[in-house]
Image (cartoon, helix red, strand yellow):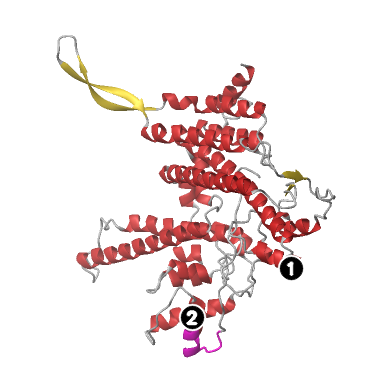
Amino acid sequence: MEMMKERFSKLLLGEDMSGCGKGVPTALAISNGITNLCATVFGQFWRLEPFPPEKISMWRREMEWFVAVSDHIVELIPSWQTLPDGSKLEVMCSRPRLDIFINLPALKKLDTMLIEIVDSFTSTEFWYVDKGVGGREKDGSSASFIKEATVTRQEEKWWLPVPRVPPGGLSLSTRKQLDHKRECTSQILKAVMAINGSTLAEMEVPHSYLDALPKNGRACLGEVVYRYITSDNFSSECLLDCLDLTSEHMALEMANRVEAAMYVWRRRHHHHTRPPTHTNRSTPKSSWDIVKDLVVDGDKRDLLAQRAENLLLSLKQRFPNLTQTTLDATKIQYNKDVGKSILESYSRVLESLAFNIVARIDDLIFVDDITKQSDNSIVHRKVFSASSSAPFRSTFSNPTLSPVLPLLSPARGGEVTPFLGGSTAKILRRGLGVKRALSNYLGSEANNKMKTTTTCGNPLEAFASISNKSSDSRAPKASVVEGQEQCSVLQPINR
């Protein structure tokens, strides 16, 4: 009872313990409360083992408190009521709001399924060893090759314990169960990501975000990306292949730039669709010419906004575990809808938990694979090469191990945008070859001096061949090797 009083006091005060009315809105207080609860209960999920019973009971008890307010979020719908004399009267009756009625029970079910998956890891064939603890395996063989093979996967997550398996690896039945649990968790992850994405999409865009946007799309994207997205031969996949997206930070920055440009074009399109109310009759242009120019300009901005949306979608498909963009974080901060706040925060913490479960299973599968390969007398060099091309996604993949090629970085185009801060002010020379090839390609298109077809299989070779035919024949050719897809932790849960 005392704990419940404390939780509701914080919600009513808006996390302002002084009581001066300077607290955050109720929606944000609930979102922060659910986030902090998840960090307390699941923040140290480092091993595939059942959760302590006291933590599970704490999670279920306090989550019931947070979502209890959703029982009173209703909408009024017309209905007919029959009176005692047989006459009918139309009245308004209440029912749970549709988005809460559909998504909240689904989230509760997915929550239960995730906890059941974790609780099923009992009497396992594997165990864990803390980092820096030496020793030998049960058969007396040295485990140095396992430590060396896993160091590249865990050098960013140095605090995680290292999984260990028997000398012959996991049994066939255990491996099948492990693969099945991973597949189930992946499906749950997709479901909660869909709920979280739809909830964020329904939130209003804050005015503070729109006010902070640059004046035009060129300032958001940079010169080179802007020229390519406005060209006739636009392809989102080809553009992504040309950009330096070998790290999560670069991919997130590119997503922020594209999303900002999309809203800049949509906002200006909305402002320019209405014809001017006061026209000067002395101007040489007639009213019809002015309206026609506005329509053409509006159609162009609508096309550019659609291209930016397609580019953002392709980027999120290539990096499915990308962290929250600036717009998403701003929506959560300024959201006033309590129902959407519950759905967003609940789905986000379940997304974090599901992602961690998949990551821990991937680590165990990785160790099992290299253990079985070592038993087949495969040398350490071949074992390491095979592990780098494992079919599953590495949670601890190191961006520094990605191929270093002269790719074009979205943050290194030479422009400094006020919207993204000053982190991109430094002009580096990496990617100038691709930038020159793109410039020559777009310049030749604008001058209509040649016609060429750009394929997505190797776009840089096409750009280089065009540049060789143009006046500037010094643009180097570059090959594209797609970087490793990076996995990320979900904000604001720190894993």
Q: Which mark is residue 196?
A: none
- Marks 2 and 1, how far apart in space? 37 Å
Q: Which mark is first along the chain, 1 or 2?
A: 1
Q: Is residue 65 magenta?
A: no
Circle 2 sits in a helix, a strand or a loop, which is it? helix
> Is any atom of residue 343 visible in this view?
yes
Residue type, label 2 = Phe
User: In this rendering, is residue 14 above or below 437?
Assistant: above
* Other residues around mark 2 within 10 Å, as few (<14) / some (14–19) / many (≥20): many
Residue at 74% of width from left, 64% of height from top? 377
* Other residues around mark 1 within 10 Å, as few (<14) / some (14–19) / many (≥20): few
User: In this rendering, is residue 133 above or below 27?
Assistant: below
> Is any atom of residue 491 visible in this view?
no
Circle 1 sits in a helix, a strand or a loop, which is it? helix
Quarter of the image for residue 263 reads: bottom left
Answer with left or right where residue 159 lies relative to residue 462.
right
Count of marks overlaid on the render: 2
Q: Position of residue 417 (x, y in %)?
A: 55, 62
Q: Nearer the viewer, residue 172 or 293?
A: 172
Residue at 59% of width from left, 36% of height from top? 35
Q: Is residue 468 magenta?
A: yes
Quadrant showing the N terminus: top right
Q: Which residue in the structure is indicated by mark 2?
A: 463
Q: Position of residue 131 (x, y in %)?
A: 79, 49
Segment tinted magenta in the rendering: 465-475
Q: Position of residue 478 (x, y in %)?
A: 57, 79
Residue at 71% of width from left, 44% of height from top? 126
Q: Position of residue 435 (x, y in %)?
A: 54, 76
Q: Which residue in the structure is indicated by mark 1?
A: 381
Q: Nearer the viewer, residue 67 or 327?
A: 67
